[in-house]
Image (cartoon, rainbow, N blue to C red):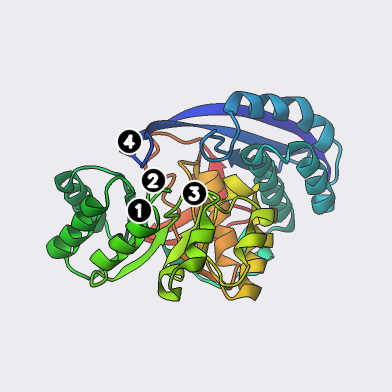
Amino acid sequence: MKISKVKVWAENLALTRPYTIAYRTIDKVENIFVELHTANGLVGVGAGSPAIFVTGEDLKGSLALLEAELPAICEGRDIRHLHGILEDVQQKMKTRPAALAAVDIALYDLFTQYLDVPLVKYLGQCHKGLPTSVTIGIMSVEETLEEAKDWLSQGFKILKVKTGSEVERDIAVIKKLRETFGYDFGIRVDANQGYDLAGLEQFLQGVQSEQLEFVEQPFPRGEFQQLQTAEESVRLKCAADEDLHNPEDAIPLLARPNPYGIFNIKLMKCGGVEPALAIASMAKYSGLHLMWGCNDESIVSITAALHTALACPATRYIDLDGSLDLAKDVVKGGFVLKDGIMYPNEQAGLGVTRI
């Protein structure tokens, strides 16, 4: 079953809900797409969301690399040699993880279509489905409450609130959410590197009665050693994001005492399904929990992350709302969303269909 043709292109995907995080406002996203065709009509599709501030790569450079290198790597190769092809792709694209992720996902999609099984079944499904959080950016208390009301009315049960601008303001927002909507939903926080240790401890103290799930990446990347001096209750309440890009990054984060109790894995940062599984295995054998996150991404890569998450025993949380606010996409299908819970659609591969 040989790959006969490679197609690579980019799409500018506008957001229906622009949002603000600790250091910028986002209103659109450009994604790279990869299609791998076989002569008998199978098509594997992958997507990547390169961004200098997240993956360290620009779209123009990643697109050019894919166009220059991918046909020579993939065309004429037998998809049954999946891992050998992946190794060759990884060697060429190790510094461009979102581009690598797009190819990785397309290869896994094509391979599991060839096997006629959903990707999650091939990987070893151990979770039927999981509730995803939906993200609320940094905004006024009134705007936060309005957006929270909208998401909760749609059946979502977990809010992820962006913080990191001002501790007192952040505490007030969480308290107001509980005061207004009660305790029948989960709240997690993404500080986006906006705190120091004193600020983190002040924040956690201020919301200790508000049933907060965890705080994602409280400190700037590379400063996780500060967490190793904190109480275990604080460390277990923190999730690594910017500190964790790839399997190599995971190694120092496994040193005792663990600075984080949770690893947030993003396919765009680590380079796709294959390296994500390596990180997941490290977390499993170190007793850490997993969260699976995303950027603003196509249904293609969101579905790939969901399938991978549901195949990992250490998975406890998903934050895979990255396609929900896209004004357009290039595919439909992929997953089923019901009452805020995401399930695979049981079709072969990723189960996506080109629009």
In the rendered image, residue 191, in percent from the top left (x then y), is placed at 38, 52
Q: Which residue is mark 1?
A: 134
Disc 1 residue type?
Val
Check disc 1: other Cα within 10 Å, few if <14, some if 14-19, many if 20+. many
Mark closer to the chain start, 1 or 2: 1
Residue at disc 3, secondary structure: loop
In the rendered image, residue 308, in percent from the top left (x then y), is placed at 60, 60
Residue at disc 2, secondary structure: loop
Disc 3 residue type?
Cys
Q: Is residue 236 left or right of residue 77?
A: left
- Label 4 – label 3 distance at C-alpha: 17 Å
In the rendered image, residue 66, in percent from the top left (x then y), is placed at 71, 30
- Label 4 – label 2 distance at C-alpha: 9 Å
Q: Which residue is drawn at the image coordinates 65% and 29% (left, top)?
A: 62
Residue mark closest to the camera, 3 vs 2? 3
Along the line of sight, the residue nearer the viewer: 130 or 292: 292
Decide if residue 59 is in sight here.
yes
Disc 2 residue type?
Leu
Q: Which residue is mark 3?
A: 294
Mark closer to the chain start, 4 or 2: 4
Residue mark closest to the camera, 1 vs 2? 1
Mark closer to the chain start, 1 or 4: 4
* Badge 1 vs badge 2, beta-carbon distance below 8 Å: yes
Residue at disc 1, secondary structure: strand
Along the line of sight, the residue nearer the viewer: 345 or 154: 154
Q: Which residue is mark 2?
A: 324
Q: Which residue is mark 4?
A: 16
Q: Is residue 340 above or below residue 328?
A: below
Residue mark closest to the camera, 4 vs 3? 3
Q: Which residue is drawn at the image coordinates 62% and 42% (left, top)?
A: 46
- Label 3 – label 2 distance at C-alpha: 12 Å
- Label 1 – label 2 distance at C-alpha: 9 Å
